[in-house]
Image (cartoon, rainbow, N blue to C red):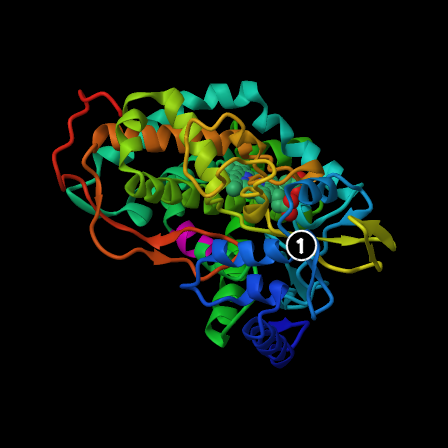
Amino acid sequence: MSTLKTTAQLFALRTLVRGYALLGDPYAGVLASPPDRDPYAMYEKVRAKGDMVRSRMGAYVTTSRAICDSVLRDNRFITATFDEASMVPVTLVKNGEKIVNPVQDSFLMKNPPDHTRLRKLVQPFFTPRALKDRTASIQKIVNDHLDRLGDRFDLVGEFASQVPIQVIADLLGVPDEDRAIFARWGSSLADTLDGVWSHKQLKDLHATIVEYNDFIDVLIEERRRNPEDDIVSHLVAQHEDLSREDLVATTGLLLFAGFETTVNLISNGVLQAFENPHTVLPLAQSPEYAEGFVEEVLRLDPPVQYTIRWPKERLELAGVSLPKGTPVMLVLAGANRDPRVFKDPAKFDPTRSNAREHLAFSAGIHYCIGAGLSRIEGAIALHELFKRFPNLAQDGPVARRRSKLIRGALRLPVRANETKRSLAVKPS
Ligand code: HEM
């Protein structure tokens, strides 16, 4: 196995980024701030400098909701693979054959016409009608997992990750016994989405990608022989001209995007409930309140914090002339707190009327295909969790993910019966 970019080159780049971050550079700061640093305070510092803040590394950073939205919808901007952006050395070769990276080689990182062709293949599984048909099974999955919990548990490992893993595995057609390994693969991929920081991390990433390729090859072959009513069977049967790379990457993107983000939506939601105890009873009592609650979590503490786009030609943006290929970092989590759009933006208010104007799911052609699914999962999971355990309380320090791109908890110890809170009491 070999990498196409050397480890030494990468670590040199990481050191440079860390150095710029220490000097207060906005782009490097978002990429490389220490794990315990509050990202939102940093985004506010960027906002105070203006709508388009230039980094010494040649990039621009914006926390303006209007600019983020317009760039995401502007076809003069493209996405680039991590390799082009020099962020992660994930192009692997094994026995002379390319190992497909489920993120880098997927349609998330592609531009039209390839992006359009591949996205269209899986779109039918995410229509409102298709999601409606899934709702009862999501409800069952949530309740089954709640049934297994004791008085003390890790909210992330035993609940928040289990529900989305099962939902997406069912959708793709992954057998029950193969699910256990997903959490480890997902963490390994998610932690490296914004860069590789150690040799161990690099080795883990390589192992994950290789293991995933082996796993998905077997599943594809199995579904080719014994098709069922799932996405992998559909792709294999309907699209014989689909290359192995496209098949492996599309399936992998759905698998990892499908649970690594929703896990964090649920854990970020639980943390908001702990910080805002007056929301717990209405959350437990009302599925409609739970929907608004989820929308506000997505706005205030979104699982995906930023994305990057590159202009494919020289152009003007908000009064700034951008040469072709200049990275523009769109801080979605900052845009979601733009005071020109959201009143009292740092306040958690599940009844906020315009919360849905957040950009947590991006916008334009790469708008999250799973937005509807994760909204349903998040609302059912949080509503049922607090309905079952209205006295749920934190039972130890939260361990946060290392990634700056993906925000959420890695571990969150909780107790089901800390204090007595009655569901009969009306919310204040
Ligand atoms: C709370 C949960 C989720 C969040 C916050 C989230 C966020 C995002 C964001 C921000 C993007 C666009 C990135 C960009 O523009 O560069 C995206 C794309 C995507 N998401 Fe999600 N996502 C979530 C759940 C899901 C789920 C459940 C699935 C699948 C079942 C999914 C599948 C995808 C796919 C396939 C794309 C690529 C779309 C494209 O490039 O056309 N996501 N997601």
Q: Position of residue 14 (x, y in %)?
A: 59, 74
Q: Nearer the viewer, residue 190 or 314?
A: 314
The answer to whether 349 appears left or right of 364 in the picture is left
- Magenta-colored stretch includes residue 182: yes
Q: Where is residue 146 in the image (x, y as percent from the top left)?
A: 25, 34
* Residue ID at (46%, 43%): 346
The residue segment tinted magenta is 181-186
The answer to whether 326 appears left or right of 344 in the picture is right
Residue 274 location, quadrant: top left
Q: Is residue 152 above or below residue 327?
A: above
Q: In this view, does 280 lie above or below 32?
A: above
The residue sitting at the right extreme is 314
Q: Position of residue 136 (x, y in %)?
A: 39, 21
**Do we see residue 254 in this rendering?**
no
* Residue ID at (46%, 68%): 34
Q: Nearer the viewer, residue 107 or 227?
A: 107
